[in-house]
Amino acid sequence: MNPFRTALAALGLAVAASGAAVAAPIAFVPNPNHTFVRFSYDHFGFSRQQSRFDKITGTVTLDPVARTGAVDLLIDTKSIDTGSALFNEHIQKPEFLDTGQYPTATFKSTAVKFKGDAPVTIIGNLTLKGITRPLTIHVTSFKHALNTLRQDSIGANATAIIKRSDYQMAKYVPLVSDDLDVSIAIEAATAGSTPGAQ
C-alpha cells in the first residue's frame, strides 16, 4: 500500500469529518397543508370543544449535528376555525381573541432541548393579544427525512397548555375552562421548496 495515498485518504476523511461537525443550521418553512395549531377546552361541563388556526407561517431552524434549533412562528388569529361560521365571529370579539386589534399571535423560542437527535422541549414566549408570556412546548414525536417530493423535511407533534386568563380572555371562567390544551402538528421543508399536498 502506498503510504502517501494512505496519508491523503486519511487527510480527506479528517477534512470531511471536520466539515460535518460545523454543518450550518437548516431553515425549514411550514407546509400550510399540514401545519395546524389546535386547542380544546371544557364547555360548561357539557362537552370538550375543539378549534384550530388554519394559517401558520414562519421558520423552524435545525442543526442536527450541533443538536440546536429555533422556532419562530406567526399565527393568523383570523384564521380560527371552530366548525361554525357564527362562532368563528364570536370568538374573534374583544373579550376573546380580539382579532380586530390583534390579527396575529407569535411564538419565538429561547431554547430547544434535545434527547439524542430529537428535540423534546421547546421553551419560548407566546405573544397573544399584545401580551407576552413564557410557554413550554413538549414535542411528542419528531422526524427528519426526505418527504415524498424528495425535499429535506421535518415533522413533529407537540403539546402545550395556556391559560386564557393570562391573555385577558377569562370570560366565563371557571364555567368554561381557563386552561386551553394546545396540540400542534407541523410539517416543514427547506426554504424555497414548493409545498406538496401529499
Image: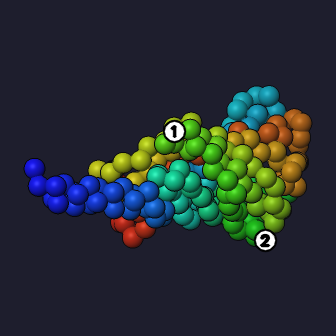
Q: Position of residue 31 (x, y in %)?
A: 45, 58
Can residue 19 be seen by looking at this rendering?
yes
Horizontal side, residue 41 vs residue 157: left or right: right
The front one of 97 and 108 is 108
Question: Tag 1, which secondary structure?
Answer: loop
Q: Residues within 10 Å of mark 2 (few under 14, many from 20)?
A: few
Q: Name the residue under label 1.
A: 116
The front one of 173 and 159 is 159
Question: Residue sitting at 76 percent across and 61 percent down?
Answer: 127
- Answer with mark 1 or mark 2, whichever residue precedes in sequence: 2
Which numbered tag is attached to residue 82?
Answer: none
- Vertical comparison of 169 with 190: above or below: above
Indicate the amino acid at tag 2: Gln
Can residue 33 be seen by looking at this rendering?
no
Q: Where is residue 16 in the image (x, y as percent from the top left)?
A: 32, 59
Quarter location, residue 6: bottom left
Q: Where is residue 189 in the image (x, y as percent from the top left)?
A: 41, 59
Q: Mark 2 points at which residue?
A: 101
Question: Tag 2, which secondary structure?
Answer: loop
The front one of 21 and 198 is 21
Q: Where is residue 97 in the image (x, y as percent from the top left)?
A: 77, 58
